Image (tube, helix red, strand yellow):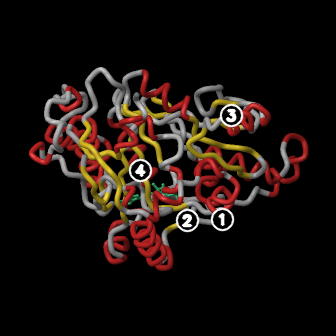
């Protein structure tokens, strides 16, 4: 056993010579067969792949409001607020090469961003024990996933607008048979063209609340009167298919329901404001009232500051830190980090290894 500052910003120790007494013969430390492409394979794949193309410019940069014509007919089918929500909700649905990317809908993203404070107050199950943040030292052991076990859950954490959605989407599109996101749950009604268990698991508010009481969500919250959440069942579904499940959550949700999935947490860090200015020229962001708005000078400063504060507050929870500077490089680094997380020994809290027993 060893006591360490549990997570080291900048990466975990993977050198087998650091094995702790008594761990050397552990079958869990045997190398696992490679299941995801190596960094060099990815590099060559990347060269041919669509994500090497320059970012496409977007055209819509004004705040979205329901057009007058639609407002006139709004009462026939939806309220104006609902139409605006539908616009947000549909704008980010994504089907590429026949792959449906669940979990990228804007209402879900907006909920994740806007209700952070509310969730923190109302969702006790999602709040880490005070000890997690107040005690930076924790007993740890080296762990390597045995080949017969499901993959470790990969959690991406970062400040709003840092590019988590983009990185996760690109990773999954690059290799959908390896990476997948869980299908979120919602209590909002299903709409024409949607399929249950594709865009969302559509459930009643009562069932959603029942699941909350039974601690079945890694995180959840409310947006425009509807509940949204990422369930442990949805994560399990992905893992049981033999895929690597990539989720993004607020840092305070990391500890709650995910321990038994031995999550590997990657902090996506903002580069300097100067680099943000250079790299985000064509980037677009969404807020509560705008769709595809260009980044402003204020956004860059706020993003860098939010990223710095998040890192300072939660760094002991991070296994790796990845600076999202050049997008292509960041994607490649992310793949390498995930590969190491799944196939090389990593430090985990002792309490996580005991959950197996
Ligand atoms: N490294 C990068 N270089 C250039 N543009 C980037 C980079 N990373 C992300 N972007 C762009 O920045 C914008 C915001 O990214 P994204 O939506 O992924 O952020 P996010 O962290 O998921 O934000 P939120 O949590 O607020 O939804 C998108 O237009 C995305 O294409």
Which residue lies under the disc numbered 3? 211
Which residue lies under the disc numbered 1? 63
Secondary element type, mark 4: strand
Q: Nearer the viewer, residue 242 or 3?
A: 3
> Label 2 neighbourhood size at 10 Å, few (<14), some (14-19), many (20+)?
some
Q: Establish if 102 lies above or below 139.
A: above
**Image spot of residue 229 (x, y percent):** 62, 42
Q: Mark 4 or 2 closer to N-term?
A: 4
Q: Secondary structure at mark 3?
A: helix
First in residue order: circle 4 vs circle 3: 4
Q: Earlier in the sequence, mark 1 or mark 2?
A: 1
Cα–Cα gap, marks 2 and 3: 36 Å
The answer to whether one can see residue 191 in this image is no
Is 342 drawn above or below residue 106 in the view shown? above
Name the residue carrying label 2: 293
Please tell me whether residue 28 is drawn above or below residue 17 in the rendered image: above
What's the distance in space between the residues labelled 1 and 2, CA to CA?
Answer: 8 Å
Real-space Cα separation, disc 4 to disc 1, in angstroms: 29 Å
In the figure, is residue 195 to the left or right of 46? right
How many numbered discs sit on the rendered protein? 4
Badge 3: how crowded within 10 Å, few (<14), some, or many (20+)? few
């Amino acid at each position: 056993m060893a006591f360490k500052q549990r997570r080291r910003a900048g990466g975990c120790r993977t050198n087998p010579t650091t094995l702790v007494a008594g761990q050397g013969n552990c079958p869990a430390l045997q190398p696992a067969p490679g299941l995801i492409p190596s960094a060099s394979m990815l590099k060559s794949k990347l060269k041919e792949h669509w994500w090497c193309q320059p970012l496409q410019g977007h055209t819509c940069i004004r705040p979205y409001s329901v057009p007058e014509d639609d407002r006139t007919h709004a009462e026939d089918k939806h309220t104006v607020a609902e139409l605006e929500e539908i616009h947000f909700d549909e704008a980010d649905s994504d089907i590429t090469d026949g792959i449906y990317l669940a979990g990228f809908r804007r209402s879900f993203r907006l909920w994740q961003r806007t209700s952070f404070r509310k969730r923190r107050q109302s969702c006790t199950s999602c709040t880490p024990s005070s000890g997690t943040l107040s005690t930076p030292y924790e007993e740890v052991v080296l762990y390597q996933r045995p080949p017969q076990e499901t993959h470790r859950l990969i959690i991406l954490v970062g400040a709003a607008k840092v590019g988590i959605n983009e990185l996760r989407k690109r990773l999954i599109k690059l290799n959908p048979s390896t990476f997948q996101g869980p299908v979120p749950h919602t209590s909002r009604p299903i709409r024409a063209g949607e399929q249950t268990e594709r865009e969302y698991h559509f459930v009643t508010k009562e069932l959603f609340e029942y699941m909350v009481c039974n601690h079945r969500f890694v995180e959840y919250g409310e947006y425009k009167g509807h509940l949204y959440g990422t369930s442990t069942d949805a994560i399990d579904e992905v893992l049981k298919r033999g895929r690597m499940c990539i989720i993004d959550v607020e840092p305070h949700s990391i500890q709650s329901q995910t321990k038994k999935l031995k999550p590997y947490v990657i902090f996506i860090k903002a580069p300097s404001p100067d680099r943000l200015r250079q790299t985000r020229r064509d980037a677009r962001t969404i807020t509560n009232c705008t769709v595809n708005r260009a980044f402003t000078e204020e956004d860059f400063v706020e993003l860098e500051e939010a990223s710095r504060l998040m890192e300072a507050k939660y760094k002991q929870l991070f296994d790796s830190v990845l600076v999202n500077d050049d997008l292509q490089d960041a994607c490649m680094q992310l793949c390498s980090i995930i590969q190491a997380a799944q196939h090389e020994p990593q430090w985990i809290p002792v309490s996580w290894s005991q959950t197996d027993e």
